[in-house]
Image (cartoon, rainbow, N blue to C red):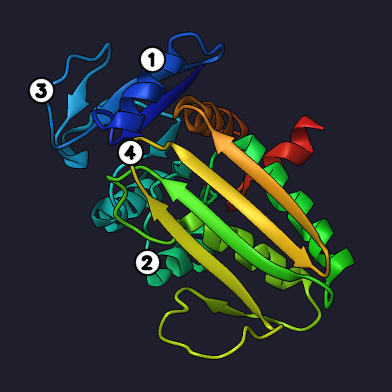
Amino acid sequence: MINVLLSGCNGKMGQVITRLAENFNGLKIAAGIDLNNNINNPYPVFSTLKECNVKVDVIIDFSHPKAFSGLVEFAQAKKLPIVVATTGLSAEQTNTLKKEVSKNIPVFFSANMSLGVNLLIDLVKKAAKVLEGQFDIEIVEKHHNQKIDAPSGTALAIADAINETLEEKCEYMYDRHSRRKKRSKQEIGIHAVRGGTIVGDHSVIFAGNDEIIEINHTAMSKEIFGVGALKASMFLAAKKPGLYSMTDLIAEIN
């Protein structure tokens, strides 16, 4: 049995994971960390990491970028693998995770915990390679009106994956209203829509002469991210120090 410490357990995603874990074989949430302690959970919840006295095997983080430093320090001190699913990390935090923390402990980091989104990324990389130089590329992401960061980390991950595939690298264009000139061939447009209760929608548009190819993923509920995080924690529990992602998880499934 893999015992999980869930950081951000009383947030929306934390509660989704708590519910899903009850029916997940070989895994259980053994303890939680959250400043908000007003929710009853089937496991002990601590306000700080120092208070946590429960033995755990892996950490799932769905908290806030502000908690990042303390959490990775705790994980390294306890030699615990960590699944980082918090969105909105700064470039500095991401670099720390990839270049420093992953040298000491197993780190699972993905801009999106959905298996479907990561399959979409694989598909658009293949499309970009075939269509390079002939099609303009635009990415449109849609999320609920409570989401703070824009564009989404997933949209940026898609753009980065495409750019890594292209022979001639592209500039990211986030806003066109201030640039009064024709679209350059060497750019990827990234657009954010915020409204209602949209869980998450990502579309990659390849626009060519007289034809359009669009690859889309729509999340219908937050559960897909919870399932991905739980699978990632089971995958990571027995791994050696290093940086892992959904690509590694999908490869192991196959």
* Front residue of 14 and 82: 14
Image location of residue 155, percent across then percent down: 54, 58
**Residue type for callout 3:** Asn
Query: What residue is pinned by disc 2?
Result: 90
**Residue type for callout 4:** Gly
Residue drawn 85% across the image and 67% down it: 131
Query: What residue is pinned by disc 4?
Result: 196
Q: Nearer the viewer, mark 3 or mark 4?
A: 4
Regarding residue 207, the answer to whether it shows in the image is yes
Circle 4 sits in a helix, a strand or a loop, which is it?
Answer: loop
Q: Nearer the viewer, mark 2 or mark 4?
A: 4
Image location of residue 184, percent across then percent down: 66, 86
Query: What residue is pinned by disc 3?
Result: 38
Q: Pick out the residue farthest to the bottom.
A: 181
Up/down of 97 relative to 52, above or below = below
Residue drawn 35% across the image and 26% down it: 55
